[in-house]
Amino acid sequence: MAVALGVLVAVVLGTSDFCGGLASRRSSSTAALLGMQVASLVGAVVLLGAGPTPTPTANVLGWSVVSGIGTAIGIACLYRALGAGRMAVAAPVSAVGSGLVPMLWGILRHGERPGAVALSGAALALMAVVLVARSEPDVPEIPEVLGVPMPHDARLASSAGVAAAAVAPDTVNELLLAAGAGLGFGVSLIGFAEAGAAGSFWPVLLARLTGVVLVAGVLLALRAPRTLDRRDRGFAWTAGLLEAVGSAGFILAFRHGLTSVVAPVGALFPATTVVLAHFVLHERIGRVRAAGLVMALVGLVLIAL
């Protein structure tokens, strides 16, 4: 049950990141982040109303706030990375932290002891994420798709205004942002794991509320852009609603399985992002990334066993 929920979460969150990345490429990443957070809050309200609503304890409240802060930081870094670089690199790197941090937390903090086969599958899944994140040196120039220009297709006009060249993204900055996103997501999942046993979706709502307040406050203080391009609102809102559903799925999965097993399964969400980027934006997967996707499936089978 927990593994199945983890796989579903990976699909939902991978799609959410894909939509958020599209919104971040044409509009500013800050505007996309705020729009996504507000939509996610609305989704959390709906989810809370669909189930039991016992009064949240101090423990639930505290860990939910921690989760909200981690999510806000993680998404801010990820959207900046997705908007400036390649989805097929930024998303997988961020997933390493989101899978490894809560996995280590469950083992070291709570003494979780997953079986050798499941632990091997979790390790294989994390190795797969690294392979999927592997950069391909010969990325061809790609035209606009869905009206969203690819970041590595930055045009350098000649004096006649007709020449163009592909510009490689700042790989170091891209990886640092993705690593920061992974750390934030890992902290967020720890918060959900610690607060998720209360029998309701209060942690999702409280975390989303924390995220909206934090993001709005920072954007106001920095006077950052907060208006989404009209064409990108659907992407941001879809990303937010899917993120709320994915968070709820994580809470359910943590109630049925070990944190050290559920987190690496859910961390496979970049596979969804990579596949969508390949078929929709025509980002190439390459043999190494393809091998990583196969390894991820093998890891899932081992965990399920």
Image (tube, rainbow, N blue to C red):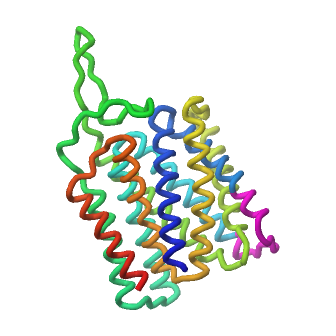
Magenta residues (range): 44-61
The residue shown at (68%, 50%) is: 213
The residue shown at (50%, 62%) is: 185
Check the image and name the residue furthest to the top: 160
Q: Is residue 43 above or below residue 263?
A: above
- Within the image, what quadrant is residue 71 found in? bottom right
The residue shown at (47%, 40%) is: 22
Residue 202 locus on image (x, y percent): 73, 67
- Within the image, what quadrant is residue 146 found in? top left
**Residue 177 forms part of the magenta stretch:** no
Q: Is residue 161 left or right of residue 300?
A: left
Check the image and name the residue furthest to the front: 279
Q: Quadrant of the C terminus?
A: bottom left
Q: Quadrant of the N terminus?
A: bottom right
Q: How many marks?
A: 0
Residue 144 locus on image (x, y percent): 37, 30
Q: Is residue 37 above or below residue 22?
A: below
Nearest the viewer among 190 and 222 is 190
- Within the image, what quadrant is residue 126 found in? bottom left
Residue 284 locus on image (x, y percent): 27, 46
**Residue 49 forms part of the magenta stretch:** yes
Residue 226 locus on image (x, y percent): 61, 34
Q: Is residue 131 left or right of residue 64?
A: left
Q: Is residue 263 above or below residue 226?
A: below
The residue shown at (46%, 80%) is: 260
